[in-house]
Image (spheres, helix red, strand yellow):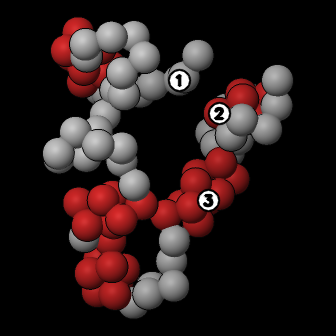
């Protein structure tokens, strides 16, 4: 189970309907291959954005940590945060 925000659900459903087989990748890079860090970096203009913001050393993984740290504040149960982070069963 993967928790999804409601706005993302239609995109995922469309992709599920379009994949050829259950073992196919849900999302791929532009030529159909596996998504890589380099592809994501280029597609999001990560280097340019963090440089413009003055945070050249920021990594996307840092945002994961920040999000997971903030989740309990508005009331997300810690058990759910652990599941989202794949740290708990």
The residue nearer to you, when weighing 29 against 53, is 29
Q: Residue at x 36, y 65 (%)?
A: 38
Per the rendering, the mark at residue 81 is none
Crowding around mark 2 (Cα neighbors within 10 Å: few <14, some 14 to 19, many 20+) is some
The residue indicated by pointer 3 is: 66
- Are circles 2 and 1 on residues that touch, CB within 8 Å? yes
Q: Examine the rendering and report whether any part of residue 44 can be seen.
A: no
Secondary structure, mark 1, is: loop
Tell me which numbered mark, 2 or 1, is placed earlier along the sequence: 1
The residue indicated by pointer 2 is: 84
Q: Residue at x 44, y 87 (%)?
A: 56
Q: Is label 2 or label 3 in front?
A: 2
Secondary structure, mark 2, is: helix
Q: Which of the image's four quarters has the C terminus?
A: top right
The residue nearer to you, when weighing 5 against 27, is 27
75 versus 56 height, above or below: above
14 versus 63 height, above or below: above
Secondary structure, mark 3, is: helix
The residues tagged by marks 3 and 1 sit, at their Cα atoms, a distance apart of 18 Å
Per the rendering, the mark at residue 3 is 1
Tell me which numbered mark, 3 or 1, is placed earlier along the sequence: 1
Q: Examine the rendering and report whether any part of residue 22 can be seen.
A: yes
Crowding around mark 3 (Cα neighbors within 10 Å: few <14, some 14 to 19, many 20+) is few
The residues tagged by marks 2 and 1 sit, at their Cα atoms, a distance apart of 7 Å
11 versus 22 height, above or below: below
Q: Residue at x 36, y 28 (%)?
A: 25
Q: Residue at x 17, y 45 (%)?
A: 31
The residues tagged by marks 2 and 3 sit, at their Cα atoms, a distance apart of 13 Å
- Residue 13, position as x, y percentages in the image: 28, 14
Image quadrant in which you'd find residue 33: top left
The residue nearer to you, when weighing 36 against 43, is 36
- Are circles 3 and 1 on residues that touch, CB within 8 Å? no
């Amino acid at each position: 189970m993967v928790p999804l925000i409601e706005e993302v659900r239609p995109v995922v459903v469309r992709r599920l309907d379009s994949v050829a087989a259950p073992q196919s990748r849900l999302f791929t890079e532009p030529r159909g291959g596996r998504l890589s860090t380099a592809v994501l970096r280029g597609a999001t203009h990560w280097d340019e954005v963090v440089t413009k913001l003055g945070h050249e050393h920021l990594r996307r993984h840092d945002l994961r940590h920040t999000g997971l740290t903030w989740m309990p504040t508005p009331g997300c149960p810690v058990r759910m945060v652990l599941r989202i982070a794949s740290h708990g069963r």
